[in-house]
């Protein structure tokens, strides 16, 4: 099993909306590195869900429910059609969100792809980084 972080602006598609929907297609990714990450995802992989732009915090977990397939949101007339999507289902809301400020201040998380590739919407995470997020979410903020 692998670990990943996916980002969405909460006003576009929030974690609450994922919970309400029960599942969704993760599509519209137009960055090659993020696309390649989508293609590496396997059914059952664990995701961290990050609210970008507004919120700037990791708010919950999710799972990959269907591996990569051609992104149906691509305009059929577009020259570049080599994009992918995956399906995801909600996991659990974190006991408390982990802010980007906390991520950057943490010795383990400060080296994560969330910090290294801040504009990347789909990023690999290590088990150690994932476990650290879960651990921090159970603690009171300092």
Image: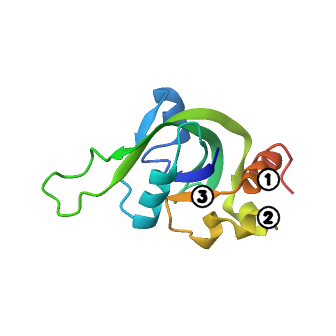
Say which mark, if any, is on residue 132.
1
Residue annotated with mark 3: 124
Label located before the other in sequence (1 or 2): 2
Quadrant including the N terminus? top right
Marks 2 and 3, Cα distance to the nearest angstrom? 14 Å
Label located before the other in sequence (3 or 1): 3
Tell me which colouring the rendered structure shows.
rainbow
Marks 1 and 2, Cα distance to the nearest angstrom? 7 Å
Note whether 20 is above or below 25 in the view shown: above
Mark 3: few/some/many CA within 10 Å (<14, 14-19, 20+): many
Mark 1: few/some/many CA within 10 Å (<14, 14-19, 20+): some
Label located before the other in sequence (2 or 3): 2
Residue lying farthest bottom? 116
Looking at this view, is 131 or 103 the one in front? 131
Estimate the x, y position of residue 111 in percent, counting from the top left. 72, 70
Side of 28 relative to 3 (left or right): left
Q: Secondary structure at mark 1?
A: helix
| Labels 1 & 2 near each other (Cβ < 8 A) | yes
Q: Which residue appears at 50% of the width and 64% of the height?
A: 120
Q: Which residue appears at 45% of the width and 44% of the height?
A: 13
Say which mark, if any, is on residue 108.
2
Estimate the x, y position of residue 66 in percent, counting from the top left. 45, 36
Mark 2: few/some/many CA within 10 Å (<14, 14-19, 20+): some
Q: Which residue appears at 35% of the width and 61% of the height?
A: 30
């Amino acid at each position: 099993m692998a670990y990943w972080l996916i980002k969405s602006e909460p006003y576009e598609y929030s974690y609450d909306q994922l919970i309400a929907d029960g599942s969704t297609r993760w599509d519209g990714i137009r960055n090659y590195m993020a696309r390649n990450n989508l293609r590496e995802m396997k059914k059952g992989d664990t995701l961290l869900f990050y609210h970008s732009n507004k919120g700037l915090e990791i708010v919950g977990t999710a799972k990959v429910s269907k591996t990569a397939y051609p992104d149906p949101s691509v305009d059929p007339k577009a020259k570049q059609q080599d994009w992918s999507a995956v399906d995801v289902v909600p996991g659990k809301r974190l006991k408390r969100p982990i802010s980007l400020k906390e991520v950057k201040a943490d010795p383990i998380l400060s080296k994560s792809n969330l910090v290294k590739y801040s504009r990347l919407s789909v990023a690999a995470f290590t088990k150690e980084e994932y476990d650290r997020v879960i651990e921090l979410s159970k603690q009171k903020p300092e």
